[in-house]
Amino acid sequence: MITRLSGKDFITTQDWTREELETALEVAYRLKAEFAIGMPHDHILRAKTLYMLFFEESTRTRNSFETGMTQLGGHAIFLTPKVTQLGHGESIKDTAIVLSRYGHGIAIRDCRKGIGRRHLYEVARWADVPVFSMQDDVDHPCQAMADLMTIQEKFGRNLHGLHFTISWTYAPKYVRPMSVPQALVMLMPRFGMNVTLAHPKGYELMPEVLEIAQRNAEAGGGSLRIVDDMDEAFRDAHVVYPKSWGPLMTTEDPAEVEAMAARYKDWRATAARMALAHRDAIYMHCMPVDRGHEVDDEVIDGPQSVIYDQAENRLHVQKALMALTMGGRL
Ligand code: CP
């Protein structure tokens, strides 16, 4: 367990060693157990403030961070460009320095392609408080950590040899970023899982992310394979994580995006596909989910689904990350 994490940013899991990530999970388990038995832990970040700057909408991320700060005894402030002077063109440098003079942490969601990740590191450069990613165009590290915790809860702490499948699905409502599948392919092989990534042609992830995932697999004792067949990806998997993302490496033209997706409407999590997976397989989704397109109700509402555990674990993991990095008294 690493005890000297105060002041460390959490922008991508790649910036944390495996031991540091395991420390965060240990603390998350402790805070979850205390939460379950109604034991308050509002001394941990008493009177501390987190600024949450959102460039996009959120249900889970905003509410789990804000609730987490309340439970740790602090306060979180919801910001958007419109309610700050960012909307009038004030620089992110000035914003970062001023906020870090007032409070104890800055969390940002910025998924704009080619901008979000750079923006987060720019804030981290100027802020002298920890900076947390609430999702960018490359990674969604808090989601991936909550997912890792959920998988450990279902299969035990040692995940070596577990077969983890992340598959593209059809979803017509809006174009999702690639950050969740990318976060998963980078993190899960570090914990020894055999990762299968499935998608139709045109939905490739960023090449630099796949290179990191491959290196992580070699170092972590896991593996990475890429297939273009959803059935093949589901076969014998212990964890299936079917979700949509946009063909952002191919096109961002709305008409092309819609036409491409329409060719693959059968990429959906169905009971027949779940039957291909391992007998004890779990179904995961980060939400929001496009029911009836990405997945059938009988799967997402069925006994193999762990989606609400994943959403809950966002709270516990983020509390642990904030407690460890924002000078919490654990
Ligand atoms: N999974 C996730 O990040 O959900 P929100 O977009 O609602 O925050």
Image (cartoon, rainbow, N blue to C red):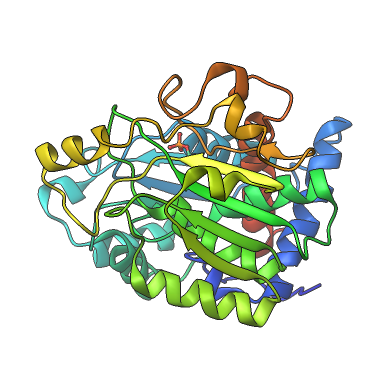
The x and y percentages for residue 275 are 67, 32
The x and y percentages for residue 312 are 66, 35
In the foreground, 200 or 143? 200
Q: Quadrant of the C terminus?
A: bottom right
Q: Based on the displayed image, in which of its 4 quarters is residue 116 positioned?
A: bottom left
The answer to whether residue 131 of the structure is visible from this angle is no
Establish if 265 lies above or below 149: above
- Asked whether, in this view, residue 127 is left or right of residue 26, the answer is left
Which residue is pictured at 29% across the width and 28% down the height?
172
- Asked whether, in this view, residue 74 is left or right of residue 243, the answer is right
The x and y percentages for residue 283 are 64, 36
Which residue is pictured at 37% across the width and 52% down the height?
178
Establish if 312 lies above or below 237: above
Q: Residue furthest right?
A: 37
Which residue is pictured at 76% across the width and 64% down the height?
161
The x and y percentages for residue 17 are 65, 77
Q: Based on the displayed image, in which of its 4 quarters is residue 280 positioned?
A: top right
In the foreground, 286 or 159? 159
The answer to whether residue 251 of the structure is visible from this angle is yes
Q: Based on the displayed image, in which of its 4 quarters is residue 136 positioned?
A: bottom left
Q: Quadrant of the N terminus?
A: bottom right
- Asked whether, in this view, residue 120 is left or right of residue 241, the answer is left
Labels in figure, total: 0
In the foreground, 52 or 235? 235
